[in-house]
Image (tube, rainbow, N blue to C red):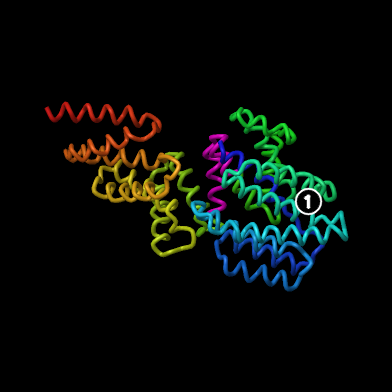
Amino acid sequence: MNKYIALLIFFFAITLQIKGQDAKFDSIVVKGIQYIYSIEFKQAEITFNKLIAEYPYHPAGKFFLAMLDWWRILLDTSTEQRDELFFEKIEQVIEHCDEILDEDPENVDALFFKGGAIGFRGRLSALRESWLSAVDDGREALPLVEEAGELDPDNVDVKLGFGIYNYYASVIPEQYPIVKPLMIFLPSGDKRLGLKQLKDVAQNGKYTKYEARYFLMTLYYRLEKNYAAAEEYSKILNDDFPNNPVFERWHGRIAMKKGDVILADSIFKSILLKGQKRYPGYNTLRAKREANYYVGNNYRNLGKYDSAQVYLEKCMNYSLKLDKDGESGFLINATLYLGMIKEMSKEYAAAKMYYERVLDMREFGNSNSLAESYLERIEKQEK
């Protein structure tokens, strides 16, 4: 549930607009955004520092420098070491926008980037499960975004924020009634309108089309269960940014859901190889855990048990380091599968050890009942 609240809060964070600037300004911003999604952070930093030097009064440069830190956080959400620096940069953006608005209260750029900065601050709070701070930031950002939208209603990029909000504000209360009390502070949504707005931005947006494609991919996967549509946007994103680990991992998950095991195996092996080569974002524990799980499970399904054991043990070990708030599905399934491999090899003592570990964990699917039945099966075989 928490991830969907975070997505709802994220509506306030990505409604960006550049207005009234020259072609040079425009080209710098577009290039910098592409560097961010390509995970070429050094080049992105150089690009946005150039933007600040040439357009010191515009808030875009400082905002996108903060977005560099946001993506660094997104690549490895298990650590909070970059949070403080990110918050500091966001405050600098807000202060810059306030200075502009003091002189020109209807400056659309300042309204948008202030709203976006507050929204991203709220999104990080949501990611860290500081829900009161997240909702408070959302309430503060909404009127800023609405005012900017009213001042320039024909801008395509602004539809991204409204599209995300309309979709999630409609869907979340239906699927998760526990969040309904939070919604009394926010306007109601419109799912159909939200999807229409997102598709418009995905096709016609200038600065936010990649975010629109990202959100369409994730909502079709998570909520609509339309894996063909999710794959359509996943393929576009991965073609544009082949070394973005967030997009590539989604591509692998979607392939698995569609039953394209060969493609999924190829993707997750690619992720592991890029991790070994130390591509940015590919060498995190989360990325390695997920990739090792799917590669290992594919080897298990193919009957290549020695290879499966190697990858599943790595998945299990990474999970033991990551699972601070309870066992993940990765850990539970990897442990169960290792027991099955040992049982297939007639190593019954080792198999029983793994099955008993599963019984000490929370129920995931029917993991406990399976472990119990497998233990009974071993006992019969040992008699």
Residue to which mark 1 is pinned: 155
Percent x, y of residue 148 = 81, 50
* Magenta range: 216-238
Identify the residue at horizontal 75%, vertical 73% (top origin).
54
Percent x, y of residue 116 = 71, 52
Query: In the rendered image of this protein, does residue 159 appear above or below residue 40?
Result: above
**Apparent side of residue 275 relative to residue 179 in the rendered image (left or right):** left
Identify the residue at horizontal 72%, vertical 50% (top origin).
15
What type of secondary structure mainly makes up the magenta span? helix
Check if residue 175 falls in the magenta segment: no
Secondary element type, mark 1: loop
Percent x, y of residue 140 = 75, 46
Query: In which quadrant will I find the N terminus?
Result: top right
Identify the residue at horizontal 18%, vertical 38% (top origin).
349
Specify the amino acid type for callout 1.
Asn
The local crowd at label 1, few if under 14, some if 14 to 19, many if 20 or more residues have their Cα within 10 Å, is: some
